[in-house]
Amino acid sequence: MVLAAMRPSPYPKRRYFACGPTNDQSKFIFWGDLLALVPDWALATGNRDRDISHSDLTINLRGGATIKVAGLDRPARIEGDFWDGGVIDEFADCKPSVLQEHVLPMCVRPGSYVDVIGVPSGRNHFYSLVQQIEAGELAHARTFHWKASEVLHLYLGTERAETFLAQAKASMDPDTYDQELNASFVSVRDICYYCFNATDHVESCPYDPQATLFVGFDFNVSPGVAIICQERRYRGDNPHVDRTEDVTMVVDEIWIEQNSNTRKVCAELLRRYGAHEGEVWVYADASGASGHSSQTSGSDLDLIEKCLSPVFGSRTISDAGGVVMAYRSRLTMDVPASNPAVRVRINSVNARLKAVDGTIRTRIDPKAKHLIRDLEGVQYKKGTSDIDKAGAPDLSHISDAFGYLIHRRHPMTEDWMIVTQF
């Protein structure tokens, strides 16, 4: 794109775009690279302060060409005049109609072009576009396909690439691995937690009063829920469960069917585990900072801390003679400023349930019957990355709580996702 904008042309005021789903994404993807790629001698006056607008994200070049970075969440940003070419990245996350209705009608000059790139995301509009091209329905379009598994061998060398891919297989679920590292248009599954299987994952998980207790909260009135987990080495007889590191053990769940609030869920937690001797870590819906569901004073997160601190707030540290040396809090609130994207959180749960190499790192006690029902039944809305809460309003709450906990402790990081482009 930069070379095209720098070449001589009979057309004055040529325009080139670099777009992504949003303005912030587009700036993150393109702006720094464009500033580095365009030399001073190619600028309109040779003065970077005069020819580059950091507010409008535009670069003016010698010969009258302009390069603009913009987000396609508001197509009006690129409407109003013709374009000579450009690129759309992360196309799978853009609005489905933006290419046909807003971009292509503006690219009608001879020699104009559009590069559409990105990582597959199910069988959405990106998949449909590729299918049209490969079927010969779009005569002037072509597709090019690179797998990360191929690119990495060139970039890292065979040994390092194979190590990287082995790590990915051990930490990602099969669909995400195929999508992100094999650039495959994996068929979208309606079931969110497709890696769950009761035969593989459900068995008795005894509670250890001295091991750390991990508690996940989701904030609702009907039902009020929490999930209780511990992590330790597996000693059972399932050959597929990881024995090299601690696995997640779901030892219990709290489910208050009607007229609940955060204080009631905490009271039930203390009734069952108030005598717990180890540390307690809390994970929760980050929106709980606003306190929308507790129906009592203070935010949900504030209420959790107020309810649990008197019981789990401190541990006495004494010397050999029994003299108190210090007090250390046993309660840790580990809640991020904002929630992860829904699909990212669900991917983390699926990867913890079963990785590409078949390794299982989650055990669920049969008493957690509502979580089991969730993992078997929660679905996506058709054609979206959102959970279908309207179709089954009693589902998803306790698996959301589990997801906040798992993603915080064992995130399927996006490090794997930056190396593959379609």
Image (cartoon, rainbow, N blue to C red):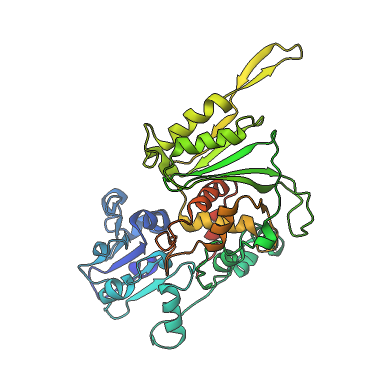
> Residue 16's spot in the image, x, y percent?
31, 67
Residue 103 in view in this figure = yes
Quarter-of-image position of residue 206:
top right
> Residue 123's spot in the image, x, y percent?
47, 73
> Residue 380's spot in the image, x, y percent?
46, 64
In this view, which residue lies farthest toward the front? 258
> Residue 406's spot in the image, x, y percent?
57, 49
Residue at 60% over, 49% down: 410
In this view, which residue lies farthest toward the left? 80
Instruction: Give left or right: position of 284 versus 280.
Output: left
Instruction: Give left or right: position of 77 versus 353.
Output: left
Quarter-of-image position of residue 93:
bottom left
Quarter-of-image position of residue 359:
bottom right
Along the line of sight, which residue is nearer the eye, 178 or 240? 240
Residue at 60% over, 36% down: 272
Number of residue marks: 0
